[in-house]
């Protein structure tokens, strides 16, 4: 088997897209390993994801020839190697449970990424007990005055490393509109509430005050509209009257870690497509 | 065994409350069947629920003598027969899945209530396929002009029937402040969202538009502050990108029915105590 | 739009199936509304489900012409009207929560079926509080001696009514091998445990004795191998040490009702395909 | 506040136990911070857990005087410092996700333990990417011939270190009856299935073959009866037809880690009491 590819695409819906795409692949000797599509009747949009064994046809040939079909159907599309680890830059502040979780999954081979840098607004010692191995660590403190400059530095690190994804793994800073726009569609944040409830700061304390019976976490793409980006994944857990805010924080760590890990994995496997301010998620 | 009682109480926390309450009961021949307490350290409040076999001591004797202790400790308290079905008035509009569910549970003996009236702002035919049996049905239409009058009529039906609890089983009308205040602490509403997200009208459509990955329902006591009453129970389910608003409505019906039923059961079993705008829920 | 069709198929996997099937439909003016496929690499089998608007091509034309393609690829396949309610025979004993739930869903239009008969081994009064409307009720008592005869009678009712699906909605009798074989692939049972745990009788009591912390229910196709049929859907709930067997039975009713309803809905929408002793379930 | 204590006890149920225990504590100046009880009517047994601020009374005085009451009521009981980290020995084989998870929780202060030794039947390199810090690591290989000797060595390490709990964090060896008996009530295992389903080896492969729609994990006390020990905690996740055994193993790791961590935390906080082959779990 040749190295498997993953093709993702979206376009206006019309009859025959699936037939044309799959026939295109079949005629070039491609064998479909997994395929999903979604016809969004509310917006008349079409979304598709195909994993394929390209057979003897070189990837660049497929890409070049598919461009014609894609142009005709006015597609947004991407053709990628399925199994190439994506380069990821992880940003963190003082709470490193999400970072530790992502790195553990990476080390045992379950997270298809290559962590190319870790950026924190706090020094290395703030997360001293987490083993970073050879991953470069950048301490980039931030203040109101230095924000512009710090963000430029983050962009330059990301560019130098060829970061394909930026993960805000409990990075407790709000990105500027400029920064959010720069990383649009390739920056995932974990918000420690079940959005749209409890936006803003200290969501577990808000949840405690309100007396809700479940807490949650939401992984979403970062947009200029804070806490309003397209949601990729969410989960919740039941809580009770005896749970103090500290207990909520403890329980929340588990939810945050697994929700962020799932969202990152889905993104890295090219399973998330943007659909306006919503997402199409093709689970396996 | 004598008819079991249930004692619920709350007061300022201080050393010795449990000892005094349980000694009081023991000295009168009472045998505890189930007991729970909660010391709320954030508010220094104490909550307790005891199910007991009172032995040979008449309930009224226990009540009279407990009043002294309760007075001394400045308790809010209640002593009730555990197994007496509570009289419940159910209000509904056009969607009767919650009503049908409550009535089924009542008929097979799992909901400890006596439905004493059903009130709707729509005629009987609106929920024609639901079997009401002998339960009186009141059609009380409502408009902006007649709201005051209609609500007075609801109060008078509730009073005449001795309603102990009013359940808004998808009753699609907002109670006036006066009405909410009248039924304070004994009126449960089911909101078809995971509060505090998606307050207000058409929550499933709001959820669809926002692109959340879970939908939920919240059962709460009605207060003058719409959608802000103390929450008794909540639950959620995962949804996907292919779920249309209609699908959300369908999935939501299941969540609403079971969340409301659980909240009503907890209330009827005297398991819910108010703690400011939150609740203490002593599950079995 | 013409009446939508649903096409389901399975066959040995090979390159080009999706292309051939979707091209076939496109060439006849069909428009895909929803499509899913599954390439089972463990068995080299291919499964597909397509909802389509057939455009101007008559269904019988599509059927006749597809037969050629299907024959060539040695497919098991089915082409059906998507929205035609399927004829369902429901069997029940003394506990009717699943029956009541299915009928309520049917009445409000969320379950795409036409209940054509209800068969019970107990008299109508056993489920007296459930409203059956015009659905014929057949009391077919059963004993060791009459089992053969009773089952023949069930088959003859099913045949006369053209039952497409038989639902064992807590029908507390074991079907004979002959009966199970007769209804193979079109008879769904709800088992009140999280299979494969607690097969056999009184699963909630078994669960209590074992001290598990969750209980569940499993909907599966009936086979001659009792409790071993292909599972369609399962769900669970947490329980605690204070839950008596009676509490488990109460909590279990909710799980059973919703698991069976979901399995029946999935089957009626032609979303369940058999894959040996497992199922492929194409959720929406 | 003095150092809080935790009192756990069980005995035959009879009237007045709660009154006597709480009065005993009150009379000695103790203030209850949290209290739970369970009257098991199926076995007429009583279970209680109390967290208390002992005030000015020395712990040893409370212990000595409580012994009299405990003797009279024939209690099994324990009085411990609530906040003293318990000494824990962790055993592991080649899969270290549970170990890594427990150690991370310990490092950030959420797991009230002191890991005093890690024992593996594989060399240190087998879990090379997990940071053990100063925790002694013992490589104790095991074969059929050396099992007796290896287990004796484990016992001697546990004794030397004063291990209060032994956690089998995916230790892929079956303890001998002698070993299981030695650590009775203080050895927790994580089984990677939703017991009692899929006992024995390769549960995820069993689950795949059977075609279940959920997988789970169970944390239980180890007994001489393999996979039959009292269950402390269980959880599950939904799976689909596209999940290969490898996917189940990946999803299972998350469930195993969080189920074991919760069970260990509950045990360390003295929240788990044995009730025959079941457990009473007093959650917070």
Image (cartoon, coloured by chain):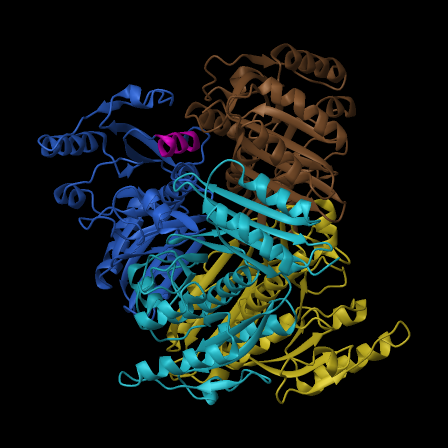
Chain colours: A brown, B yellow, C cyan, D blue
Q: Does residue D102 show up magenta in the picture?
A: yes
Q: Is residue A85 left or right of residue B177?
A: left
Which picture quadrant has residue C219? bottom left
In the image, is D251 to the left or to the right of A60? left
Point 52% across, 17% down: residue: A125
Instruction: Provide the residue span drawn in magenta.
Output: D96-105
Q: In which quadrant is the N terminus of chain A drawn?
A: top left
- Relative depth, front residue between C229 and D13: C229
- Residue at image x 54%, y 70%? B265
- Residue positioned most to the top: A160
Residue D53 visible? The answer is no
**Viewer-proximal residue among C118 and C128:** C118
Instruction: Report the predominant secondary structure element of the magenta stretch.
Output: helix
- Relative height, residue B85 to residue C38 (above, below): below
Q: Please tell me which residue lies in front, D118 or A111.
A: A111
Front-most of A278 and D180? A278
Q: For the point 31% across and 65% down, which residue is it?
A: C226
């Amino acid at each position: 088997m040749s190295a498997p590819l993953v093709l993702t695409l979206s376009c206006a819906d019309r009859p025959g897209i699936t037939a044309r795409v799959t026939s295109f692949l079949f005629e070039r000797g491609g064998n479909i390993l997994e395929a999903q599509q979604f016809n969004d009747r509310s917006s008349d949009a079409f979304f598709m994801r195909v994993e394929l064994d390209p057979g003897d046809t070189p990837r660049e040939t497929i890409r070049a020839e598919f461009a014609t079909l894609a142009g005709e159907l006015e597609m947004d599309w991407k053709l990628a190697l399925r199994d190439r680890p994506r380069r990821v830059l992880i940003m963190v502040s003082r709470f490193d449970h999400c970072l530790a979780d992502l790195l553990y999954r990476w080390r045992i081979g379950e997270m298809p990424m290559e962590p190319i840098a870790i950026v924190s607004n706090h020094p290395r010692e703030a997360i001293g007990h987490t083993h970073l191995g050879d991953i470069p660590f950048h301490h980039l403190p931030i203040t109101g005055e230095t924000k512009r400059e710090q963000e430029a530095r983050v962009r330059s690190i990301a560019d130098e490393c060829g970061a394909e994804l930026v993960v805000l793994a409990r990075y407790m800073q709000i990105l500027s509109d400029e920064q959010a726009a720069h990383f649009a569609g390739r920056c995932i944040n974990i918000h420690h509430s079940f959005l749209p409830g409890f936006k803003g700061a200290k969501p577990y304390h808000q949840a405690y005050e309100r007396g809700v019976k479940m807490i949650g976490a939401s992984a979403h793409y970062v947009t200029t509209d804070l806490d309003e980006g397209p949601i990729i994944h969410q989960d919740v857990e039941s809580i009770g009257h005896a749970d103090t805010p500290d207990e909520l924080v403890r329980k929340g760590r588990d939810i945050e870690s697994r929700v962020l890990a799932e969202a990152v994995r889905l993104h890295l496997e090219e399973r998330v497509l943007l659909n306006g301010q919503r997402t199409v998620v093709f689970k396996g």
